Image: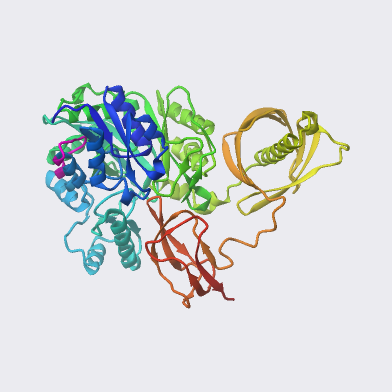
């Protein structure tokens, strides 16, 4: 390895910012890269220099190796840090960096190649004596062979893409009759996500935890582990909450798993940061799943409990230094928990969201760390992952860490785009999570889809939203008409009230608001619900303070068109002012029109005009934010129009197809 002075970060978003901070702290110059969609992104302004890659789609920017190498040459960078995602586990990129005389801050291309293929990796781990889940890793990839082997292994079984990760190309099959469908679906998603349709099969370990070990190796033969992280709280095989240490791992098990992870790294002559992922069953047995040859999203929890800077370690190892400490010197202190803040709507089956960030405020406090890429006025585009940041809390024990993180989430303000923030609070508050009693089915078990979709704002929250809408509009009217502030509380009769209709999703509430004094209101939400008495003690463009039924509080809000985003009392909801709007025509899709729910790319179209189709059948497949969405018919009918083809880019609310409903 050789010394270097300037590091190009071949990534974007919060991980690019994290690496830029770490590199600058050590005295390196930094170079950011960006697509047209990220021209004004936070990581661009944080770096010393920045180089444009090209248009927004990743296939024309962040995934183009030649453009990355040219950006390094143009900026004079002599080292490249890949972050995670994109080209981070691309052996071809690592080789291209080395061929161009650039130091690749990561493992060797051979190690990336080997561990990036789940089939080859598992065979090597079996050879090294690392415990592995029983399954099929053969070269014969014919569907009939996979189905036959799956039947030999027995259901439940996991069908997994051999390349890549992140839950894509992965299917859990509990019924043999669904094997063929699962294999076809996993192949398609794997091919689109990773460029390889190769699959492996594994016996599903039921009620298991997902526990991973952070390993680090230098170029002098030293390998150590930095303890475990519990990543069991997942949705669709993607991590939602991570923590260190695991509530299920004691010192003896930690040593045993850590030694297995070290042996796995030694078996492939590893270099740099890596993560060996295991399934841990209820009996304490553990099985190798895969090795991620990069820094992980969840690395902050390890940093907080060990007191070590893993990006600094990466840079030092890349320069040829030995590891900063031996295994015996490493100590873990306290507990850390991380949650992933994503632009997605839990009420719509976690559909990724796009749009402008109208208001952003990150929490602060003892033990709180926020790694993010959000900016007020910035756009969350459909071209990249829905994760916008991570909130992490450290405490002397798990109880304190959890309480701090709940408080941080409640104080976090993200308005303009729907996020999973409130859902994360619900997870952390759940009694099973609080007790440390969870596995990979935690969310499925305790948060069924119908329950999530049925959640509604409470009475006080709705009343505050109504007052905010009324007061905002009255303030605007006063300003436009040049009226004095006393106009805000003027009234000629106590009986006069203003009628307002506010909605959330398909829910509608009719409110009567009556001024009772200077900036004081009585709100009647009907349906025998109690009237709320609210006094605004201050009101600005983005926040207000209030007293409601004797309780003083504050709220953040933002408006866009007829929408109002309101964050108060630990919850965030978006409301629509429907006072002057005509009644809804019915649930979306009930008229047969199929509109794009977000910007994205059409992967497949399954119908053509004249086809008969039943409600629930897949019409087309839309890709957005690195995920595939099966767009189904909302009605029985005849396909009248298909306005898109495979490969087309679509905008949110664009008409993609139309079905003539039949009785």
Which x, y percent locates residue 230? 34, 38
Q: Quadrant of the N terminus?
A: top left
Which x, y percent locates residue 178? 35, 66
Q: Residue at x 22, y 26 (%)?
A: 5
Drawn side of residue 300 relative to residue 488, left or right? left
Q: Is residue 310 visible?
A: no
Which x, y percent locates residue 489? 80, 32
Seen from the viewer's position, the closer of residues 661 and 658 is 658
Q: Is residue 251 above or below residue 192?
A: above
Q: Is residue 212 above or below residue 334?
A: below
Seen from the viewer's position, the closer of residues 39 and 547 is 39
The image quarter containing residue 359 is top right
The image quarter containing residue 629 is bottom left
Q: Residue at x 34, y 57 (%)?
A: 172
- Which residues are drawn in magenta? 99-111
Drawn side of residue 537 relative to residue 158, left or right? right
Q: Is residue 385 above or below residue 32?
A: below
Q: Is residue 532 above or below residue 657?
A: above
Does residue 589 belong to the magenta stretch?
A: no
């Amino acid at each position: 390895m050789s010394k270097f002075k300037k590091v190009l970060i071949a990534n974007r978003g919060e991980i690019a910012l994290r690496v830029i901070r770490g590199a600058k702290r050590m005295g390196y110059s930094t170079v950011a890269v960006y697509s047209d969609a990220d021209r004004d992104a936070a990581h661009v302004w944080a770096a010393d220099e920045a180089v444009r890659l090209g248009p927004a789609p990743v296939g024309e920017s962040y995934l183009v190796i030649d453009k990355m190498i040219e950006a390094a040459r143009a900026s004079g960078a002599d080292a490249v840090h890949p972050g995670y995602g994109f080209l981070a586990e691309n052996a071809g990129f690592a080789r291209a960096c080395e061929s161009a005389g650039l130091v690749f801050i990561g493992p060797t291309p051979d190690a990336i190649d080997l561990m990036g293929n789940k089939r080859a990796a598992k065979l090597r781990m079996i050879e090294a004596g690392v415990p592995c889940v029983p399954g099929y890793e053969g070269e014969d990839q014919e569907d009939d062979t996979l189905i036959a082997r799956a039947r030999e292994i027995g259901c439940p079984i996991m069908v997994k893409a051999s390349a890549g990760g992140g839950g894509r190309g992965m299917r859990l099959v509990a019924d043999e009759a669904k094997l063929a469908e699962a294999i076809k679906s996993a192949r398609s998603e794997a091919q689109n996500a990773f460029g390889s349709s190769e699959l492996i099969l594994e016996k599903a370990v039921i009620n298991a935890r997902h526990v991973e070990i952070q390993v680090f190796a230098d170029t002098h033969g030293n390998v150590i582990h930095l303890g475990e992280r519990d990543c069991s709280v997942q949705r669709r095989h993607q991590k939602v909450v991570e923590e260190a240490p695991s509530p299920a791992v004691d010192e003896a098990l930690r040593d045993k798993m850590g030694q297995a992870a070290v042996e796995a790294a030694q078996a492939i002559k590893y270099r740099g940061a890596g993560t060996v992922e295991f399934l841990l069953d209820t009996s304490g047995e553990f099985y190798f799943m895969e090795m991620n040859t990069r820094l992980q999203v969840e690395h902050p929890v390890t940093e907080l409990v060990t007191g070590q800077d893993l990006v600094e370690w990466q840079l030092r190892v890349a320069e040829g230094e030995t590891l900063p400490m031996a295994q015996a010197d490493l100590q873990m202190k306290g507990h850390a928990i991380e949650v992933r803040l994503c632009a997605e709507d839990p009420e719509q089956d976690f559909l990724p969201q796009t749009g402008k960030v109208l208001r952003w405020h990150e929490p602060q406090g003892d033990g709180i760390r926020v790694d993010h890429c959000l900016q007020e006025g910035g756009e969350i585009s459909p071209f990249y992952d829905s994760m916008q940041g991570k909130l992490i809390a450290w405490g002397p024990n798990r109880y304190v860490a959890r309480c701090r993180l709940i408080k941080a989430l409640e104080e976090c303000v993200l308005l303009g785009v729907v996020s999973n923030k409130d859902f994360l609070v619900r997870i952390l508050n759940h009694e099973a999570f609080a007790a440390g009693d969870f596995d990979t089915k935690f969310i499925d078990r305790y948060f069924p889809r119908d329950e999530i979709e049925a959640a509604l704002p409470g009475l006080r929250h709705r009343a505050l939203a109504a007052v905010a809408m009324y007061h905002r509009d009255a303030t605007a009217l006063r300003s436009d008409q040049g009226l004095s502030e006393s106009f805000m509380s003027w009234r000629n009769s106590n009986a006069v009230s203003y009628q307002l209709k506010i909605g959330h999703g398909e829910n509608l509430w009719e409110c009567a608001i009556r001024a009772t004094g200077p900036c004081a209101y009585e709100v009647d939400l009907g349906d025998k619900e109690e009237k709320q008495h609210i006094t605004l003690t201050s009101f600005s463009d983005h926040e207000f303070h209030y007293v409601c039924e004797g309780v003083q509080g504050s709220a953040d809000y933002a408006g866009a068109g007829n929408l109002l985003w309101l964050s108060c009392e630990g919850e965030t909801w978006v409301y629509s002012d429907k006072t002057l709007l005509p009644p809804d025509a019915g649930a979306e899709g009930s008229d047969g029109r199929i509109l794009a729910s977000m910007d994205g790319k059409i992967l497949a179209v399954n119908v053509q005009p004249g086809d008969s189709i039943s409600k629930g059948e897949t019409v087309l497949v839309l890709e957005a934010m690195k995920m595939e969405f099966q767009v189904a018919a909302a009605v029985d009918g005849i396909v009248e129009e298909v306005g898109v083809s495979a490969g087309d880019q679509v905008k949110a609310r664009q008409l993609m197809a139309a079905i003539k409903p039949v009785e």
